[in-house]
Amino acid sequence: MSKRKRRWSSEFKQAAVARMDAAERIGDLAAELGMRRELLFRWRRAVELGGVAALRPPGRSSKPTRRPEIVAPAVTVPADLATARQRIEQLERKIGQQQLDLDFFRAALRQVREPQPMRAVPGETTSTA
């Protein structure tokens, strides 16, 4: 039995690419949409290189498919370049803070997993010198 190749509407592709930004795991999003995650990455790359017009191959009809509608999250576009740069700085600071948190928790987990030194006598504290 052969599988038929699915055709996705341009609107569906745009919405799926928009949801990728908000998705925690792309694999989960792909499973929810009933497709392979590689296809989502291919669509995102096409949008990056050629805009949304690159999502519809030439010669394909614009007839909508029978896929459920996906509502893209509301995205606010900064009014000017200065506002955009401020937003980028805020996000970079947030990423930096998250990285510090991750490093802290990795170190803490490493300490918890390492074997503790044995004490010579029960109740005796280990030397700090």
Image (tube, grey):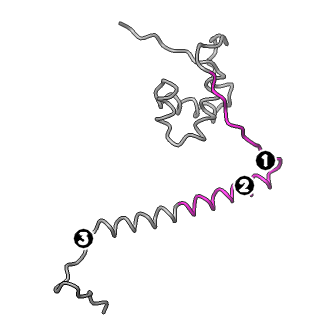
Q: CA distance from mark 3 to mark 1?
A: 52 Å
Which comes sooner in the sequence, label 3 or label 1? 1
Q: Residue furthest top?
A: 1
Residue sitting at x 57%, y 62%: 96
Q: CA distance from mark 2 to mark 1?
A: 8 Å
Label 3 neighbour load within 10 Å: few <14, some 14-19, many 20+: few
Q: Position of residue 5 (x, y in %)?
A: 48, 13
- Give the Cα separation between the discs numbered 3 and 2: 44 Å
Name the residue rendered at 40%, 68% in the picture.
107
Q: Callout 3: helix, strand or loop?
A: loop
Answer whether labels 2 and 1 touch (C-beta < 8 Å).
yes
Which residue appears at 79% of the width and 51% of the height?
Answer: 81
Badge 1 crowding class, 10 Å Cα cut-off, few under 14, some 14 to 19, many 20 or more, is few
Tag in front: 3 or 2? 3
Residue 108 appears in which quarter of the rendering?
A: bottom left
**Hey, what amino acid is under mark 2?**
Arg
Q: Position of residue 2 (x, y in %)?
A: 38, 8
Q: Which residue is mark 2?
A: 87
The quarter of the picture where the C terminus appears is: bottom left
Image disc number at residue 115: 3
Location of residue 83 with respect to 52 vertically, above or below: below
Q: Are marks 3 and 2 in contact (CB under 8 Å)?
A: no
In front here: 117 or 8? 117
Q: The residue tagged with tag 1: helix, strand or loop?
A: loop
Marker disc for residue 78: 1
User: Does 43 sit above or below residue 129?
Assistant: above
Q: Residue furthest left?
A: 120
Quarter of the image for residue 16 reads top right
Point out the stretch of residues depicted in magenta.
69-98
